[in-house]
Image (tube, grey):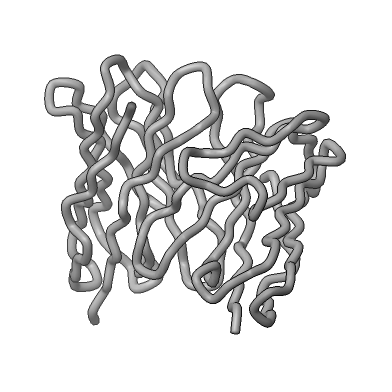
Amino acid sequence: AQSVTQPDIHITVSEGASLELRCNYSYGATPYLFWYVQSPGQGLQLLLKYFSGDTLVQGIKGFEAEFKRSQSSFNLRKPSVHWSDAAEYFCAVGVGGYQKVTFGTGTKLQVIP
Amino acid sequence: GAVVSQHPSRVICKSGTSVKIECRSLDFQATTMFWYRQFPKQSLMLMATSNEGSKATYEQGVEKDKFLINHASLTLSTLTVTSAHPEDSSFYICSAPLGGSRINEQYFGPGTRLTVT
């Protein structure tokens, strides 16, 4: 079965600083990979997804993620964090041909002035 | 973009009663919907897959008689927590994917906070 690991439970960055959230997955073949953001009182919103093709994917709100097969990773990055980016971020993996996805435990991002 | 709604957003009920949570896809049809449960400071745990016109598929360890799922139409799935107990208090989230049976991004509802007293 597939699994997702987000090693950082909580990250604090200064506004304007760069951000990288780590995600590692475990699956025998190429998975479908997602990053979602959850803000308080709001539903999960898809930031970006990787299905195939270019391993560097661009998402909404200035986020990008890079799929590295050799490292089984799909890290999320943003060059300059805004205070509104404070939220919880979930990496997720889906198995091909099937809609079920498995979520990581999430990384809570705090942005300080 | 696609919108999924949930109702109610918050509910408090007494132990032993049943609570129904609705999940609606507002601008698209969803033959499949998913129900998740999220504990505080934890990830989303898939509870079951709701299939329009057929029985739901439950994940291992989820009591199907306790969490009744009905997917009566292409835009509505309901989760009924029967004989609720305080340990059922949680945040319940539904999602619906676009793209039919092919894997695709899912659209999530805003969640329902259930508190059982």
- Quarter holding the C terminus of chain A is bottom left
Q: Tell me where residue B53 appears, x and y as whole percent.
A: 82, 30
What x and y, as percent, mark residue A61? 43, 53
Q: Find residue B11 and report its image quarter.
A: bottom right
Quarter holding residue B39:
bottom left
Instruction: Name above or below for residue B114 compared with residue A96.
Output: below
Out of A105 and B79, give the one closest to the viewer. Answer: B79
Residue displayed at 29% across by 65% down = A108
- Residue A75, image x, y percentages: 23, 41
A49 on left or right of B49:
left
The image quadrant of residue A93 is: top left
Residue found at x 51% / y 52%? A45
Q: Quadrant of the N terminus of chain A?
A: top left
Does residue A29 sit above or below B22 in this rendering?
above
Instruction: Tell whether A40 sits left or right of B65.
Output: left
Task: Where is residue A19? Give x, y as percent.
Answer: 21, 56
Side of B117 relative to A86 (left or right): right
Q: Which one is in front, A74 or B16?
A: B16
**Residue at the spot x=53%, y=22% of the render?**
A98
